[in-house]
Image (spheres, helix red, strand yellow):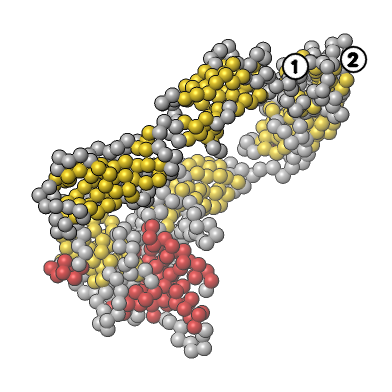
């Protein structure tokens, strides 16, 4: 029962990809079409057990209408009122006592399962309802799966139809539906197709094989042809021409909840003999029982393999120049052996290199490594006539190292302001290098003092020194050590300058003033010789913005700042920086930039409302710190007079003091808390 239940859900998970070709995913019947030269084949399945029971009870009706291109009707009732019938009567499963079932059972093994699902329901009253539901769902799944694998079973179950009355250059829409009698609800299937678009089954082109002892494992990408094929047959031969089927039962690719994205199909087959070439290919079986084109052909040969492995008897060093490896292969017929291969690595788990491009003869017992490393791990690999191989365990062979490594090169360093010393150098090329030793001294006349307590394996090191000394420089040197503790000569010492911790002389402020449009800042540059740049900042409240950077030998000593606003206070800072990044800062007192003039109001509007007998005034002004608005008014040719003083948050005014048949003019200005005033706005004129 569990096996059937898994197959049921596996098949349903494939329905959208392998059967559904229409866009109405909510349909209770899903279908697939195969367009041949003179006919159109239709296969369908119910998407759920309830629809399956309806189809079994009432049968399926198939009809069609002819359409214009790219048109699918939405109103199935009216569009199919004049439809052409494909089935003269509803397609029902063959009767329970139809003798055709007996012949099908002899031909198709799954016929018994389909027959039992259709006619032999479990009528026990003591069965648990959940178990009964699972059993019915499993039976439903087995019917669908069996019909996928056999077109004869699909016909016997009423899930197949053919349309042989088709025309060229035609576009058809088919409807597959169930004519119910008791008002049962379901959603029929609509599927459209062109009679000129012949169905072409994909060719499988990526079949691969891996052989073993009288066995082969075949793999291919199922996801690329899953919509075309329901199952697969494998074919084998020994001459690449006369293929015969290898699997009697079709291979079905199934997934589960644990591997829903499994894209690779895997089929294992047994080989009759080893050392004989066999040819394989695969063919897909469509949902219509049509076999797809043969795949690419692969060539396989079974191999018996090894039941033993080489054994290294001894590893001997000769005059500290060469190494002899003695070995043998026990319990193996040397006539089946193609030869030996010797591989070597400097580490037991490292990458091994091949020392024998050509195989050593099968009767070889010793191999001499004429150019060994200082430390060598050897493996002997036996290769038989079938090109299978078997490797020995690694064995160690060493030379006595009497040569020191090369003197390290490229030593350099830098000291930061905290006394941290960053040292780097080039990596030595010796394979048996153990590490490096570092030394330092205050003068070249001193004996170097080692600063490391263990070997350094990297090509960098961080040291720390005190900067509170009278010396301005410090010297470092290095040497290399190999695995046998041979020491190289020390490298030429490198001199490092200690950082300067005394800040430069500050710049001197000479003046800060403003015109109507700018602030002018003048200063005297620092007199320190190690100054590399001077940075100028503007300070407005808590905001600090960098304006310029003057790099040595730039001697500029003034700056005009145009990016300023009326009523704002500004201070300026000069930061002097020397070559050790020591800094000195000088900040001016804040200077208020005030001209007493603000921008005019540009958005004033005046509209006469004759019905209300008023003139409506409005304006916008985004400036802040407002004290009031002063509104001016003129009637006819009379001069402007101050008409109203308005609150700072008021941006509209209704004038009711009016006389008919007059021209009124208005203008306005803003007054700020600081006493500054905006320029009077342009005049707006309105007839009343």
Query: Crowdedness of circle 1 by 10 Å Cα count: few (<14), some, many (20+)?
Result: some
Q: Percent from the top left, x then y, of residue 279?
A: 48, 44
- Does residue 182 appear to the left or right of 334 in the view shown? left
Disc 2 element: loop
Q: Measuring 44% from the left and 32% from the top, which residue is drawn there?
A: 594
- Does residue 347 appear to the left or right of 48 in the view shown? right
Q: Measuring 17% from the left and 45% from the top, which residue is drawn there?
A: 635
Query: Crowdedness of circle 2 by 10 Å Cα count: few (<14), some, many (20+)?
Result: few
Q: Percent from the top left, x then y, of residue 287?
A: 35, 59
> From this viewpoint, which residue is outermost toward the left?
661
Q: Which residue is mark 2?
A: 447
Q: Is residue 240 above or below residue 314?
A: below
In this rendered view, identify the residue nearer to me: 220 or 489.
Answer: 489
Disc 1 element: strand
Q: Is residue 29 above or below residue 486?
A: below
> From this viewpoint, which residue is outermost toward the bottom?
125
- Does residue 265 appear to the left or right of 68 in the view shown? right
Q: Measuring 77% from the left and 26% from the top, which residue is drawn there?
A: 419
Q: Quadrant of residue 12?
A: bottom left
Question: Which numbered tag is attached to residue 497?
Answer: 1
- Does residue 495 appear to the left or right of 161 in the view shown? right
In this rendered view, identify the residue nearer to me: 579 or 635.
Answer: 635
């Amino acid at each position: 029962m569990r096996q059937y239940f898994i197959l049921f859900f596996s098949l349903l998970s494939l329905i959208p990809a392998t059967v559904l070709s229409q866009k109405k995913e909510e349909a209770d019947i899903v279908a697939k079409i195969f367009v041949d030269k003179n006919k159109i084949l239709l296969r369908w399945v119910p998407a759920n057990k309830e629809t399956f029971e309806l189809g079994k009870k009432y049968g399926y009706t198939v009809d069609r209408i002819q359409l214009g291109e790219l048109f699918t009707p939405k109103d199935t009732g009216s569009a199919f009122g004049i439809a052409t019938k494909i089935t003269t009567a509803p397609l029902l499963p063959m009767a329970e006592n139809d003798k055709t079932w007996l012949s099908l059972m002899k031909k198709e093994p799954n016929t018994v399962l389909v027959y039992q699902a259709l006619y032999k329901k479990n009528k026990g009253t003591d069965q648990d309802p959940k178990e009964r539901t699972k059993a019915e769902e499993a039976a439903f799944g087995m019917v669908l799966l069996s019909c996928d694998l056999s077109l004869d079973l699909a016909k016997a179950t009423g899930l197949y139809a053919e349309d042989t009355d088709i025309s060229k250059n035609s576009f058809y829409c088919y409807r597959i539906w169930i004519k119910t009698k008791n008002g049962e609800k379901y959603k029929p299937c609509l599927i459209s197709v062109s009679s000129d678009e012949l169905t072409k089954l994909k060719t499988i082109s990526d079949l691969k094989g891996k052989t073993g002892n009288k066995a082969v494992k075949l793999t291919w990408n199922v996801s690329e042809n899953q919509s075309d094929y329901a199952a697969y047959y494998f074919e084998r031969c020994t001459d690449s021409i006369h293929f015969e089927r290898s699997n009697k039962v079709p291979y079905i690719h199934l997934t589960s909840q644990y591997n829903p994205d499994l894209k690779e199909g895997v089929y294992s087959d047994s080989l009759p003999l080893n050392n004989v070439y066999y040819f394989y290919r695969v063919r897909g079986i469509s949902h219509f029982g049509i076999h797809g084109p043969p795949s690419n052909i692969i060539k396989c040969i079974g191999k018996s393999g090894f039941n033993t492995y080489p054994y290294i008897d001894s590893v001997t060093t000769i005059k500290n120049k060469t190494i002899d490896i003695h070995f043998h292969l026990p319990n193996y017929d040397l006539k089946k052996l193609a030869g030996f291969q010797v591989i070597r690595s400097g580490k037991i788990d490292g990458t091994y290199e091949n020392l024998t491009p050509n195989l050593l003869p099968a009767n070889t017992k010793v191999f001499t490594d004429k150019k060994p490393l200082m430390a060598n791990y050897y493996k002997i690999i036996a290769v038989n006539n079938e090109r299978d191989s078997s490797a020995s365990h690694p064995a160690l062979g060493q030379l006595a190292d009497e040569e020191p490594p090369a003197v390290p090169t490229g030593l350099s360093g830098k000291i930061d302001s905290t006394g941290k010393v960053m040292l780097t150098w080039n990596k030595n090329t010796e394979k048996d290098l153990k590490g490096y030793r570092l030394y330092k001294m205050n003068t070249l006349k001193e004996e170097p003092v080692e600063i490391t307590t263990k070997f350094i394996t990297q090509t960098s090191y961080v040291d720390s020194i005190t900067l509170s000394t009278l010396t301005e420089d410090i010297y470092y040197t290095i040497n290399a050590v190999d695995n046998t503790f041979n020491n190289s000569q020390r490298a030429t010492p490198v001199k490092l300058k200690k950082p300067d911790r005394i800040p430069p002389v500050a710049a001197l402020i000479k003046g800060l003033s403003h015109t109507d449009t700018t602030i002018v800042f003048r200063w005297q540059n620092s007199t320190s010789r190690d100054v590399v740049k001077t940075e100028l900042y503007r300070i407005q409240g808590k905001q600090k913005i960098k304006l310029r950077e003057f790099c040595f030998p730039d001697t500029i000593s003034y700056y005009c700042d145009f990016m300023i606003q009326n009523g704002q206070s500004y201070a300026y800072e000069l930061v002097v920086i020397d070559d050790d990044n020591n800094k000195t800062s000088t900040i001016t007192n804040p200077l208020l930039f005030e001209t007493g003039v603000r921008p005019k109001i540009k958005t004033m509007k005046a509209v006469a409302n004759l019905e209300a007998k008023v003139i409506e005034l409005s304006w916008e002004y985004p400036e802040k710190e407002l004290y009031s608005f002063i509104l001016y008014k003129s009637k006819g040719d009379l001069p402007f007079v101050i008409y109203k003083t308005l609150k700072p948050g008021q941006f509209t005014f209704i004038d009711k003091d009016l006389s008919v048949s007059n021209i009124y003019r208005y203008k306005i200005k803003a007054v700020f808390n600081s006493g500054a005033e905006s320029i009077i706005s342009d005049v707006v004129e309105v007839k009343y």
